[in-house]
Amino acid sequence: MTASTSPDGRRRPHRGRPRRFTARAAAAVALSLAGALTVAAAPAAPRPAPDPLARFHDQDLHWKSCLLGPDDTTGKDLEQAGAQCADVTVPLDYARPEGRTITVAISRIRGTDTAHRVGALLLNSGGPGGQTIGDPPWVRSAMKDVAARYDVVGVDPRFVGRSTPLDCHWPTGSMIRGAGNGRAGFDRMTAFAADLARRCRTHAGDLLPYATTRNTARDMDVIRAALGERRVSYLGYSYGSYLGQVYATMFPGRTDRVVLDGVEAPEVYGPRLLRGTEEANRHALRGWADWTAAHDAAYGLGHTRGAVLATVNGIRSAAARTPLRVGGHRVDEHALPVVVFNGLSQDNPTAYGDFAQAVRDLRRAAEGRPVTPSPWLASTLEFMLTGHESVYGSAQTAILCGDVPAPRDPETYWRDLRRAGSRDQLFAPVTNDINPCAFWDPPRERPTTIRGDLPALLVNATGDPRTTYRSARTVHRDWPSSRLVTLRGADQHGVYGVFGSACVDSTVNAYLATGRLPSGDIGCPRPAA
């Protein structure tokens, strides 16, 4: 969402409606000498109920340096961009605002064009569980001249990043795994998922019920009020698009300009949100294979698409027989498909090259040769196979499981895997596998029923392998006042300010500048390489 404020002389949102007084004329045309006309005042309207969140809405934010220490690269980037940071106090449980509190960390780069100020632009980069506090510098760069009219605000949602943490002390940064090729592998993953859920109950059980998108939206409205804004603008990517839909539904009238990029349809969102992305991922894999075949001299993975895909399939088969040794890690049939899946969300030469290097390293490992993994593969394996990023995986899973209930019977997942695996042995075991939500306590609240319409700007690539183009079209259909900007011919997740499409970027910036949506939907061609 969005939020903005100025610590000196900030505007406060109007609290309640003004009292209205009505008058009843009781005319008594007397035959006396006075001949007076008397008027009786109606009883005053009742006073508005006290705001139970007043102490949060009216809090004074202490703005400070974003730099946490000499190794804080995010803080250095924010410092160079002129950002400041603050901690916003919010209730842990909005049903008991007088109880325990937590903090939500925000950053802000103030707008400089105060004469044409629009307000605050709140950011969410997705996940769930993704940090956004470091995003204002690059978002301002993407906004070009219009950035001066906004206070650009990055938010680490509750339990994420610099906010009060939720840590289940996992041995992994992600709950996502491949199920393997048989029942024995699936049973291992069922035990793995159950163990992750148990760790969360043990180490973070007091926080789990409050890790939800609805509570994150409530936090955003506290941020709006604390920043002194009546309405906020919002830029949300991926999961952030769903968060934007929830906020606009729960707090109608408090959004100004809304941009949702990589749009998640509400009926898709939940613990099994990757189901249905298999074809988009196969398409992305073929696109990468074409590029890699054209660069066979650099990577040696095959000079045709078919040869490159055969290399990937050979690595998958080898990992299913015996785990591959890559540096200090063992990459088995459960981890290998996730590495491939993680390599396919960005459609550009840098991301393609990183993934091609990783596949080259994995092929060498499959051949029994010693391997020192390339930087992208090393960081991916550290994320998946160590507890280095436990906080990320913990928060992401807690939000997904806390929002929407998942099937609890492992046999449901096994049946889905057998059906989908007959068509796809690489991605279906990832997108249909069981996860810790099968062993989670039921959500405390029902999922939000998203409002019927909102004049928002929606952005999506046709080949998005995470939030599919079908999802974007579904939200556009449900919000007839919205406009859809389509990037054609790209297997790209997240477009505005990321992909280098002048067509997309200029359309979004025009909307942010004027508040007027395009007269119709817009199709943007893939930029020339």
Image: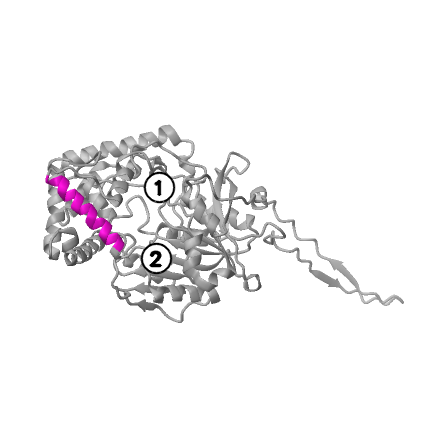
Question: Closer to the camera, 195 or 172?
Answer: 172
Q: Residue at x 40, y 54 (%)?
A: 236
Residue located 42% across and 34% down the image? 207
Secondary element type, mark 2: loop
Read off the residue under disc 1. 396
Q: Is residue 319 left or right of residue 259?
A: left
Residue 249 in sight from this viewpoint: no
Q: Residues within 10 Å of mark 1 (few under 14, many from 20)?
A: many
**Magenta residues (range):** 350-367
Overall secondary structure of the magenta section: helix
Q: Give left or right: position of 107 versus 520.
A: right
How far is the residue under mark 1 from the one under mark 2?
A: 23 Å
Above or below for 449 versus 324:
below
Q: Quadrant of the C terminus?
A: bottom left
Query: Residue 103 lies in magenta, yes or no?
Result: no
Colouring method of the image: one colour
For this rendering, which residue is in front, 374 or 481? Answer: 374
Residue located 42% across and 36% down the image: 165
Is residue 13 visible in the rendered image? The answer is yes
Point out the frontmost of discs 1 and 2. Answer: 2
- Label 1 sits on a secondary structure element that is helix
Numbered marks: total: 2
Please state which of residues 529 and 270 is positioned toward the viewer in this rendering. Answer: 529
Mark earlier in primary sequence (1, 2): 1
Q: How many residues crowd mark 2 within 10 Å: few (<14), some (14–19), many (20+)? A: some
- The residue wearing badge 2 is 498
Numbered mark located on residue 439 in the image: none
Return the residue nearer the eye: 178 or 18: 178
Q: Amino acid at mark 2?
A: Val
The spot of residue 35 in percent (x, y) is: 85, 67
Task: Identify residue type, mark 1.
Answer: Gln
